[in-house]
Image (cartoon, helix red, strand yellow):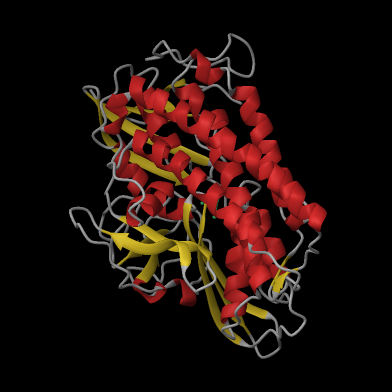
Amino acid sequence: MATIKIIDPITRIEGHMKVEVEIENGTVMDAKVSGTLFRGFENLLKGRVPEDAPLITQRICGVCPISHGQASVMALENVTDWVPTSNGRLLRNLVLGANFIQSHILHFYVLSVVDFVAGPATSPWKISWNADMRPGLTSVMNHFTEALTARRRAHEMAAIFGAKLPHAATYAPGGLTAGITPQKIADFKAHLLYMRDFIENMYISDVYQIDRVYSDYRHIGAGPENLLAYGVFQEEDGGVLFDGGMLNKGDSRVSDAFSSADIAEGVAHSWYADASEPAGLSPAQGVTEPEYPKQDAYTWLKAPRLFDKPYEVGPLARMIINGAYNGGVSVMDRHLARANEALIVCNAMRRWLDAIDDSPAYSEAYNQGVGSGEGLTEAPRGALGHWADIGEDGKISNYQIITPTCWNASPMDHNGVKGPLEQALIGTTVTDENQPVEVLRIVHSFDPCLACAVHVMHTDGDEVAVIHTGAV
Ligand code: NFE
């Protein structure tokens, strides 16, 4: 007999999310991922002056605020094809890089390690599940406090040019409004040297240790295996450190033959008023009009699709698309790619730091134009886009955002095709239905920015148990 399990809450993620899986004979037959909170930041921005957008959109999240600041200034500057000054570009890369590193360290040590290694029998590691906890990994857990130090130092590093973290105060169209001093550069360098050592000698080797003990997780949680990145970290030559591209399942070549006009955000199963097109609207024309309740809807996330297909985004997509990781698509590959990416970013940061000169990072010549702009970049969790319309009155007339988790945790679309995380869960073997740790490990590998819930119910909808996972 099939049972429906809902983990409530799936802790150790950011935000509000519920995952419901239907398990029959030990296999996940169906999965539904729901974002359970309406945010509506797009609507908050209407009628405001453009410079408010980088500051307000950073409040979407305390983990990835810099990516929102970056996407927002890019969208505003794109209205007039403005190119930031060299120091503006470099400082933005440095603050964003520090934010990537803190997010990756947080995700592994604080949010994920306890899925694989039993913590001490005390709060905050208890209550937790004890299913399939394999021995030999105590040393990884012993690095927990050092990881907290590393994460704090990454925040301190970002605050040198961000003025504060989370939610940097220096993001403005036209550059970065931070002063540059030799002391700031020296302080940044000291953090960076520490960080390189931590990532290389502790973080990466800890992930590989878990990979050795849980190597079966290289074959669990694949999903659609369509990968997408927009590209991030602007370089001097107009290129980027990580290129954008899409790689469809089974293809051997990455393609960059797409634009945001090829993206449509469907709302067939989302609590939003139906769009005029069943496939949804492209983000530049996007509308955020809540409709709750709504027949057949189960989430506040829309369903972004590129050429009508779901795509996984995130460090694994970035690294495979850039030829920097040659594994497959699975739970463990997501962790390994994330750790390896942290080192690449750290090394590039050293180069960007050394390239800073004594010119200003903010240009007083910046003049906000009127019209439409898009900012396509990457957040730690994957492809992030902001789309802005500035009206003749100089105010924001429309604003749309598609976050990485919106791609990964998107619901079923108008074709009946499930989102990447839902597809990754379907087909998974669950050994202990009362502790569906496989489900939790798959969810966490995507590093979703939501807070989740999974309860245990019969298919007739009766809840038979509520499973609390260890909260950190
Ligand atoms: Ni809240 Fe974020 C990242 C963005 S989530 S953490 O990374 O954008 O989708």
Pick the quarter of the image with the C terminus. Answer: top right
Vertical order, 246 against 364 (above or below): above
Residue at image point 52% right, 16% down: 139
Residue at image point 28% right, 67% down: 255
Residue 358: x and y, percent?
76, 69
Vertical order, 400 against 62 (above or below): below
The reply to whether residue 337 is visible in this rendering is: yes
| Rendered image quadrant of residue 437 | top left
| Rendered image quadrant of residue 155 | top right
Q: Nearer the viewer, residue 196 or 429?
A: 196
Does residue 269 appear left or right of residue 372 in this picture? left
Residue 246: x and y, percent?
31, 62
| Rendered image quadrant of residue 245 | bottom left
Residue at image point 27% right, 49% down: 225
How many marks can you see? 0
Q: Nearer the viewer, residue 422 or 271?
A: 422
Residue 96: x and y, percent?
61, 55
Vertical order, 421 against 414 (above or below): above
The reply to whether residue 398 is visible in this rendering is: no
Q: Nearer the viewer, residue 14 or 84?
A: 84
Pick the quarter of the image with the N terminus. Answer: top left
Does residue 335 appear left or right of residue 85 in this picture? left
Q: Which residue occupies the extreme bottom position in the image?
A: 392
Vertical order, 305 against 405 (above or below): below
